[in-house]
Image (cartoon, rainbow, N blue to C red):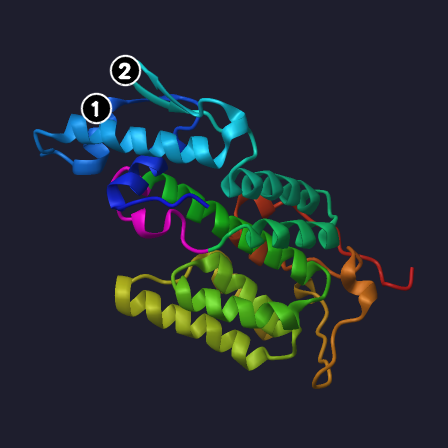
Amino acid sequence: MLALGGRKQRGLLAMLLLDRNRVVPRERVIDGLWGEKPPASAANSVQVYVSKLRRLLADDRPAEGDVLITQDPGYLLRVPAGALDADEFERLLAEGSAALAAGEFGDAEAILAHALAAWRGPALADLAAEPFAQPEVARLEGLRLQALEQRFEAMLSVGRQAEAVAELQTLVGLHPHDQRLRAQLMVALYRSARHAEALETYRAYRRLMSDELGLEPSAELRRLEQSILRQDDSLGPIVQLAPGATAPASAGRSRCSSPTSSARRLSGSASSRTRPRCSSASA
C-alpha cells in the first residue's frame, strides 16, 4: 500500500486513476485540486506532488519502469487492465448479469456476491465529495446498487428469501425511495410467510411518498400489493421454515419459482427479462 501524503496528494492519484492510461491535462488537475481560485503556486505544487507520487510508485513497483509519465499537456498514469478493484467489480457484474439473464440463478448469485465483496467501503472514500470525483462515485454506486438488486433477484429465484429479508431491510432503510428494493423485500417477506409485514412494507412506502413528495407508489408496486392480498400464484411458493432451518440445498440452482413479474419490472432493464417458472427440485 502506498504511503500517500495529504489530501491533495491523494486527490492527484485519484484523478489520474479515474482517467488511467489517458493524459490528464495539468489545468484539469489544478482545477480539480483547488477549484476556481487556485493559488499562484498551484502549478509548482502539482509538479511537487507528481514527483513525490512518481517516487512512491517507482518504489512500490520497481519492475514496471515509468508508471507516471509527464506528457503534454499533463500527466499519464499507466495501469494494467484489471489492476483496480473497480475493474474486477465491473467484470464480475457483467458476468453475473449474463448468468442471471440465462436463468443460471445459483451461479449468478455466487458471482454477484463475489463482485460485491470487492467493495471495501464507499467509492473514493474521503474524496467522494470532491467535484472531480462525484460523477464516478455516482456511476460506481449505481452499479453497486444494480449488483445488489440482481443478487437479490437470484436469491429469490433459488428459494433463499429468508436470507434475503434481513439484507433487504437494511438496504431499504438506506435507500427508502428505491421502489425496486422495496418490491424485492415485499416478495421476500411474502414468500417467507410474513404477509402482514410484506403489506406493511408497501404501506410504509406509500406514507413516505405521500408525506415527502405528495406522490403515490407506481402502478407496478400497487399491482404487487394487490397480488399479495390475493396470494397470487405468480408470487411463487410460500416457504415457512422452522426456527434455525435453511432452504434445502437443491434450491441452489434454478429450480424454484422466479420473482413476481412486478418485482422484476421494478428491478430495471437488466433483470426484467421474463423468467420461466421452474420445475421441482426432484426432477
Tag on residue 240?
none
Crowd tier of the residue under label 1, counting other residues whose Cα lies within 10 Å: few below 14, some 14–19, many 20 or above:
some
The answer to whether mark 1 and mark 2 are in CB contact below 8 A is: yes
- Residue 58 visible in image: yes
Q: Residue at x 70, y 59 (%)?
A: 157
Say which amino acid is labelled 1: Glu
Q: Is residue 3 left or right of residue 163?
A: left
Magenta span contains residue 22: no
Q: Which residue is mark 2?
A: 73
Task: Give the SS element for disc 2.
Answer: loop
- Per the rendered image, the range of residues in magenta is 121-134
Task: Give the SS element for disc 1.
Answer: helix
Q: Residue furthest bottom?
A: 243
Q: Residue at x 29, y 39 (%)?
A: 9
What is the x, y in percent for residue 224? 54, 64
Q: Which residue is mark 1?
A: 27
Dividing the picture into quadrants, the one containing residue 21 is: top left
